[in-house]
Amino acid sequence: MAEVHGFAEAKFAAVKDAFARNLDGGADLGASFCATVNGETAVDIWGGYADAAKTKPWQKDTIVNVYSTTKTMAALVALMLADRGLLDFDAPVARYWPEFAANGKANVKVSHVMSHSAGLSGWKDKIAKHDLYDWDKCASLLAAQAPFWEPGTAPGYHAITQGYLVGEIVRRIAGKTIGTVFREEVARPLGADFHIGLPASEDDRVAELIAPPPGAAIGDAPADELGKNMATNPGVDVSETKTRAWRGAEIPAAGGTGNARSIAEIHAILANGGVAKGKRFLSEAGCRKALEQQIEGTDKIMNIPVRFGMGFGLPGPMVPLPNPNTIFWGGYGGSLAIIDMDARTTIAYAMNRMEGTTTGDMRAIGLAMAVWQALAG
């Protein structure tokens, strides 16, 4: 079997075996997986290669772009500000960002932005991929445009735009960028290796993302105008993740760089009532705010039934999970973060061989099920 590095407590041996099978069968090239239980790390494993040529082994400190799993970090920052009374999810966005009221958006709530129901799933103006590195342009265009549908009436995945929307609200409140708030108030206190805006000094640790096979990438599937707008304005170019511009930019919906350990250990905050590594980050009630359903229905972009809480997906018919008080999110290609508040468990997976998915695939789901089975045993 493939060599798997790291450790898994004895009861989680099946998780390590499943991880090895993913590497052996070619489902994974290189990957990391981590689970915490009651705030303690129970599984922390990695293996395979960090590059397509298989010249660089995946190391303990290898990190990788995790696309939309980054959204969970942006959501955590917003939940922390709300817990301190600095952000009211029921308030209009315009309370914090007055320009946002333009074009009929005066009553769009922060909760609409957090739950992909603000009607701003993409930009109406044509933008290029390099525009994603221009924060002020991305945010001001969204503030000026009219929604694509009536906010609060339906979900529609805000694949890239959500990061600028949440991030600008955070910036207006905190006076700092969301990447800075995240680094100073979450990553650094926890010693967690996750970055929204990666310093150039860390570039040599970043694994090479391998794009999904032809026909499976975002933009390849048939879509209506809304779906096309999200997928092509600008298009998603996986090779862009190799550039310093992408890695260094703060793209809080898609540009985060980390590994399974950092994702799982950060989200131990939410799984354990606001405390991780002996430090309190927010109250238990503040954590449970994420569980409050904001919208349910067929997503206008992904065209699947969804249930969205405050910044996270919730279990439902499409995503049946063992415990009801569970939140999750996945990244384009396969990365995944799961926070099970009932089992006080976090599960995280980050890899470099991408599948054509934005909602997780059987590699991560299989590993997660093995964790739950071990907990039940």
Image (cartoon, rainbow, N blue to C red):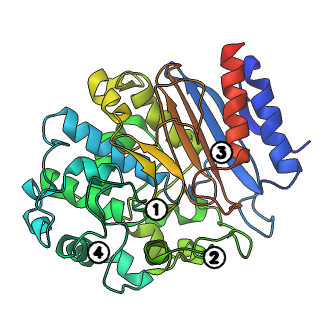
Q: CA distance from mark 3 to mark 2?
A: 34 Å
Q: CA distance from mark 4 to mark 3?
A: 35 Å
- Image-based side of 169 in relation to 156, left or right: left
What is the x, y in percent for residue 25?
88, 51
**Type of the residue with mark 2:** Asp
Comes first in the chain, label 3 or label 2:
3
Comes first in the chain, label 4 or label 2:
4
Q: CA distance from mark 4 to mark 2?
A: 24 Å
Identify the residue under disc 4.
Answer: 138
Are the two marked residues, 4 and 1, in contact with CB atoms closer than 8 angstroms? no
**In the rendered image, is residue 353 in sight?**
yes
Label 2 CA crowd tier, 10 Å (few <14, some 14–19, many 20+): few
Are the two marked residues, 2 and 1, in contact with CB atoms closer than 8 angstroms? no
Q: Which mark is residue 220?
A: 2
SS state under label 3: loop
Label 1 CA crowd tier, 10 Å (few <14, some 14–19, many 20+): many
Comes first in the chain, label 2 or label 1:
2
What is the x, y in percent for residue 246?
46, 72
SS state under label 1: loop
Comes first in the chain, label 1 or label 3:
3
**Type of the residue with mark 3:** Lys
Residue most toward the top? Answer: 377
Identify the residue under disc 3.
Answer: 60
Comes first in the chain, label 4 or label 1:
4
Q: CA distance from mark 2 to mark 1?
A: 19 Å
Identify the residue under disc 1.
Answer: 254
- Give the image quarter of residue 191: top left
